[in-house]
Image: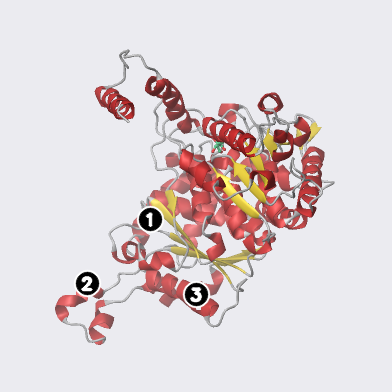
Amino acid sequence: MATAISFLTTRPAWKALEAHYKELQKVQLRSLFANDPQRGTSMTAEAAGVFLDYSKNRITGDTLRLLLQLAEECGLRARIDGMFRGEKINVTENRSVLHVALRAPKGASILLDGVDVVPQVHAVLDKMADFCNRLRSGTWKGHTGKRIRNIVNIGIGGSDLGPVMAYEALKQYSDRTMTFRFVSNIDGTDFVEAVRDLEPSETLFIVSSKTFTTLETMTNAHSARQWLLAGLGGDAKTVAKHFVAVSTNAPEVTKFGIDVANMFEFWDWVGGRYSMDSAIGLSTMLAVGPEHFRAMLSGFHEMDEHFRTAPFARNLPVLMGLLAVWNSNFFGAETVAVLPYEQYLKRFPAYLQQLTMESNGKRVTLDGTAVDYQTGPVYWGEPGTNGQHSFYQLIHQGTKLVPCDFIAFSETLNPLGRHHDLLMANVFAQTEALAFGRSAEQVRAEGAAEWLVPHRLFEGNRPSNTILLRRLNPEALGKLVALYEHSVFTQGVIWQINSFDQWGVELGKVLAQRIASELESGSEAKFGHDSSTNNLIRRYRTSKGSR
Ligand code: G6Q
């Protein structure tokens, strides 16, 4: 592998940012705000109903100017255009990256190798809608003639995290007479617990797998098949009414026994973690209905258009991406906390973990050169206010710098007394406390004993973004997800990495296949791993044998 000084760190804007960082390193947000009374209104941007307040980052107008210059020097505009034009920007897999086509409106045109993909997208959406209408109305019945009431999505990674997150996020809009479960883990407990109280004759499995070869998903799908057959008298014909597939791999779907008429297609130009708005979202559409699903797509599209057309200085995903680079590469922040103050977004941090870390957890540039700078930070989080009573301590007073994204909605879906005002008060209080802290003088003025002052003071100067939307609805969810998708892409462009492959998950998969056969075979052959792995395998085999 080539190693060299990267282009990035020799770019004029990067060099200027390094010098600028030295000046800004010690500057307090307190003084930045004191010196500019307009800061809290000027360092904001709004588009597609999403309001971003980025004023509580450790930046000045110069920082922004240099970051925007960096984006220009890195060719961000051309890369955005390339993605939307269907260029094969996923170079290591020689694929286009066209999740934006999944939400392009009817009549739009996006060419891939000369073929317009938008009509294909809408044909699948129409097929999904027709299926959902039949199932939700009870026209589609199970093998014994009973109505389907339970939907179990079987998938993992991108074929699970988006559907789970979206189901939880849009629960208010879902058909509450139906039950939705999600099985992903190869740990049998996941499947057993998901179906333990379900009636097979009323249950439909969606096997969601782009490749239809993923070990976890296929193992769970076969267990589901057995469970169904055991519950419905062993007739293989039952599969047709109780299984549908979402995949790109028709031959494997057929081999499993699912009629391709009941297969919902997507394409290799949709990355797994960018697929919740493709047919992978079938469970979402079943939950909330086709209209709400289309509304979510229009939210995605609105943010796509904003990203594609807005000047960078007002472009929400670009600003968020550049600020993430600033915090990570210059301030050395290793993580970003995502803190949704909205219970329905409880799985959003988990979803973002894959989107951000599988995309930008890379250590070589597009041409294979090892980077000499940090790439994707660790994303993590929990919904507020729960996090406040656990890990916020470290964010406020620990030794690590943790930039935070606070996400909140001005209207609640569940008005209940003072709850929402109190929830929002906590959002604003946290961003204020992180930025401005509480000085030793203030602590003393509150009457604290001198020896307690260092324990009770808050340095402040902790950066955060606040993202405000009006109400969590399908459109808003689409906008929020697209905002992060494009922010991830922006970061990847600056770092010159491929945000769309995931070779890092391969090695473990290959080794697990080999070890699985060693765990299951009766032979005492030498295993040929390192001494630790050999010993662990032997130990497991012995304890398994003694049961
Ligand atoms: C996402 C990854 C990965 C993928 C899963 C499931 O970008 O590609 O998380 O979604 O490995 O793959 P299948 O859908 O092929 O089963």
Q: Looking at the image, can residue 18 be seen?
A: no
Give the mark nearer the N terminus: 3 vs 2: 3
Q: Residue at x 66, y 38 (%)?
A: 232
Q: Is residue 97 left or right of residue 349?
A: right
Q: Residue at x 56, y 27 (%)?
A: 92
On-image quarter of the C terminus: top left
Between marks 2 and 1 in the image, the one whose residue lies nearer the viewer: 2
User: Which amino acid, by three-letter code, is at mark 1?
Assistant: Tyr
Q: Nearer the viewer, mark 3 or mark 1?
A: 3
Q: CA distance from mark 3 to mark 2?
A: 27 Å
Callout count: 3
- Reading the image, the residue beneath label 1 is 21
Which one is earlier in the sequence, the residue at label 3 or at label 1? 1
- Residue at the extreme front: 233
The residue identified by callout 3 is 423
Say if 327 sits above or below 520 in the image: below
User: Nearer the observer, disc 3 or disc 2?
Assistant: 3
Q: Residues within 10 Å of mark 2 (few under 14, many from 20)?
A: few
Q: Are marks 2 and 1 in contact (CB under 8 Å)?
A: no
Q: Give x and y (percent) for residue 484.
A: 57, 52
Would you identify the image quadrant in which residue 113 lies? top right
Disc assigned to residue 455: 2
Kind of residue at badge 3: Leu
Residue 325 image position (x, y, % from top left): 46, 50
Secondary structure category for the residue under label 1: helix
Disc 1 crowd rating (10 Å Cα; few below 14, some 14-19, many 20+) is: some
| Residue 293 x/y as whole percent | 72, 54
